[in-house]
Image (cartoon, grey):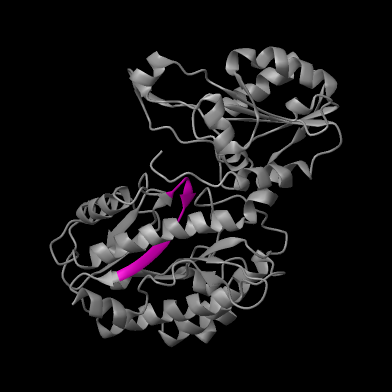
Amino acid sequence: MKYHPIDRNLFINNRNRFIQHLDKNSLAVFNSNDIYNTGADSTLPFVQHRDIFHLSGVDQEESILVLFPDCNNKAHREILFLKETNDQIAVWEGEKLTKKKAFETSGIKTVYWLEQFETIFRQLVIESDQVYLNSNEHLRTNNIMQTREDRFVEKFKLDYPNHSIKRSAPIMHKIRSVKDAIEIDLMQEACNITEKGFRRILNFIKPGVMEFEIEAELMHEFLRNRSKGFAYTPIIGSGNAACVLHYIENNQKCNDGDVILMDFGAEYANYASDLTRCVPVNGKFTKRQKEVYNAVLHVKKEATKLLVPGTLLNEYHKEVGKLMEEQLIKLKLISIEDIKNQDPNWPAYKKYFMHGTSHYIGLDTHDSGSWIDPIEKNMVFTVEPGIYIPEENLGIRLEDDVVVQEKGEPFNLMKNIPLEADEIEDLMN
């Protein structure tokens, strides 16, 4: 791994938080992700399943975590099953986790090789009253791709048809949404790397540069700072492309007079950052561009103040909508009459600001978390309002990642990344 070793107390604490939600005499199982084939003998780079990583820190394929806090055999209350390593694997693929290294990483003392899994697991299942199985229950997933976890669940139902099954996903959503102090430090490092990338490209952007050249500069800076690269596919959209919310082609020339919208973030130790900044290609905003920019900035600052414990996200987004209405009226993009006649299910402001303002962020860019329970301290959210005006060839979105505090405004993990229009112009010139 490129990243520095993570304090195993993070994973010990996460497991303790998880088992507090289990019914008595319950067993829980978590599987790693597959390595996905792309054709012939080629594969995508391995990306660990976020849940097994959150609970163990194990960052390699063919791994299984079993938790059974009420097991009679104390040694079997936490077990890691790993692919057995040997000298040949080390030569061809690199060093894998040894049992000793797995303990140092996770804090789990009992580590077996995978060949022992079926025998030991059967003993544990028979002793338990129910088994918690995992699945992807994120609101935005389509679940069309079968995973290693999915295959495990299918096999379990065939092998143990009379055993009671419960869901791990609601527990994982709850505990992953509230971040440990170590996690916040890791996310801060991801944001710090993102800052280095942004400062690098401010001196690189000029009329005639290609969007993909900017993307390349960012990747260079991320890799040299122990990141695997982008936490998600970056958006580098200049001119009208900035009005396409999920523009990822990044293949156009940046023209004099355009504003370029850049939505990107570095990952670090599997944790995501998510930044959006907009800069003038020639280093100077026009009067109108700056008016729209400052309108978005105002909404962003005011929206951030609303992210406090006890807030409901649905109510939060309605309040942000009211903030945006005020700014769009000032910009003469909508009128009071438009608001009076609007469809309550699609308010007038949605013509120019059609997406949500905040989402959870953590191990996933759109991280796990409840959308119906109140916000809690140490949850981390993006704040990303935007105004998109295709007829003016202009799209502005501004985004930071913030940590909810017990009292007062959230802490901005990106507070050192230039944001004010004047500061950006000064740095570019």
Q: What's the residue at 59%, 33% (across, down)?
A: 103
Bounds of the magenta segment: 268-278
Relative height, residue 236 to residue 80 (above, below): below
Q: 100 above or below 393?
A: above
Quadrant that contains the C terminus: bottom left
Q: Residue at x 73, y 14 (%)?
A: 159
Please tell me which residue lies in front, 232 or 407: 407
Q: Assess whether residue 36 is covered by the magenta stretch.
A: no
Residue 46 locus on image (x, y percent): 43, 32
Q: Foreground residue, 133 or 240?
A: 133
Q: Position of residue 321 (x, y in %)?
A: 56, 74
Residue 289 locus on image (x, y percent): 30, 79
Residue 162 in view here: no
Is 331 positioned to the left or the right of 60 in the image? left
Give the vertical position of 82 relative to 374 (above or below): above
Which residue is found at the position 17% from the left and 73% from the top? 282
Query: Where residue 267 sits: x, y (%)?
Result: 42, 50
Name the main secondary structure of what is drawn in magenta: strand
